[in-house]
Amino acid sequence: MSLLDHTVTSVETFEITTRYPRTIGRNARLGSHGDGPTSNAVIIRTDTGRVGWGLAGGRAADPATVVGRPVGELIDPATGVPDEHRWLDFALHDLAGVILDLPVYELLGAAGSRSVPCYDGGIYFADLDPDDAPRGIEAVLADCAADTGLGFTDFKLKIGRGNRWQDRAAGDRRDIEVTRAVREAYPNGRILVDANDGYDLDGFLTYLDAVADCNLYWVEEPFLDNAADLAALRAHLDRVSPETLIADGESNPEVDDLLKIAADGGLDILLMDVVSYGLTPWRRLMPAVAATGTQASPHAWGLPLKSLYAAQFAAGLGNIPIVEGVPGHTADVDTSPYSIKDGVITVPDRPGFGLPVPDRTN
């Protein structure tokens, strides 16, 4: 049977709740990220009893636009989902995989490995909390230690404390101290840093000089996108830490501009978000990313499910050296087909995304 032999009979939208293992604090721009968000998801059912589900990719449209239509009119396994059905991008990929008895990574081309390096994206400014009795650097180290118990060995550190929360000089010193403390505690782990645009070029170069021996894996969003500044950053890194990569593109990306910067050597990793940018757009974009000689790592922060999707992207599309892990769990979703161990997330060889349909009877 082909996808055209399966007709959509219902589309159900519902909310799912994520809970982090602790309150996630501030970054350079934003206050506390809290204990975990609520997100929209979609279940699609067919007349043949096949079911697919996934996070909603943006605002939900009228289910009547797809109910009664063959699945094969809504998704092409070779290319993805038409723009008008982008909100169903993940559910339709899952459904197509279920019908065709193929994991999503095989629909995407199986160009990568099912064993995907995965860093811990949950290390924020714990040292600054609470306001009346800040816990200091030991709180950051405690969060890293807790997350090693979840299978992580590599850590992305939020920096940029001097942008909003501390005096500039004091905040920059603390960024350096935290970076060096985590490197000392984890001499063999990848250390990534993310400034959330909390520096200017000169300030960030000063930070890099102070941590040049920490062998940073990448630096992310050091300052607002600027081709000249990114070129200057690359030149400086080539002098002080040549193996360190530059990652950008998470926030409101002008993708064509980023591709040009990447082609010119100012970017090494593109970060457009797993869900808000979308699976089908990533499928279209990846050949252009590869043509620049650069790589991708779709932003996944906020939801553990996004990390699982990112791992499927990596296994399917290739050219993704590492993905962002989000510590936490999703209520009523069985994620046990995936595992994170020794800093690697293993993608299951199961149809679709490999996640059982949430039980909606409760």
Image (cartoon, rainbow, N blue to C red):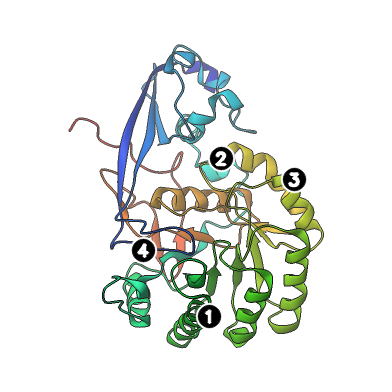
User: Could you give the CA–CA distance between mark 4 and mark 1, rounded to whole angstroms?
Assistant: 21 Å
Give the secondary structure at mark 1: helix
Q: Are marks 3 and 4 in contact (CB under 8 Å)?
A: no
Nearer to us: label 3 or label 1? 1
Rate crowding at label 4 as few (under 14), some (14 to 19) or many (20 or more) other CA atoms within 10 Å. many
> Looking at the picture, how far across and down is residue 231, in whole percent?
77, 66
Which residue does the numbered mark 2 point to in the structure image?
278
Looking at this rendering, what residue extends furthest in the front direction? 167
* Residue drawn at point x = 57 percent, y = 42 percent: 277
Classify residue 56 as left or right of residue 74.
left
Nearer to us: label 3 or label 2? 3
Mark closest to the chain's N terminus, 3 or 4: 4
User: What is the three-letter code of the residue carrying label 2?
Assistant: Gly
> Looking at the picture, how far across and down is residue 25, in whole percent?
36, 63
Classify residue 271 as left or right of residue 59.
right
Which residue does the numbered mark 1 point to in the structure image?
169
User: What is the three-letter code of the residue carrying label 3?
Assistant: Asp
Which residue does the numbered mark 3 point to in the structure image?
256
Which residue does the numbered mark 4 point to in the structure image?
25
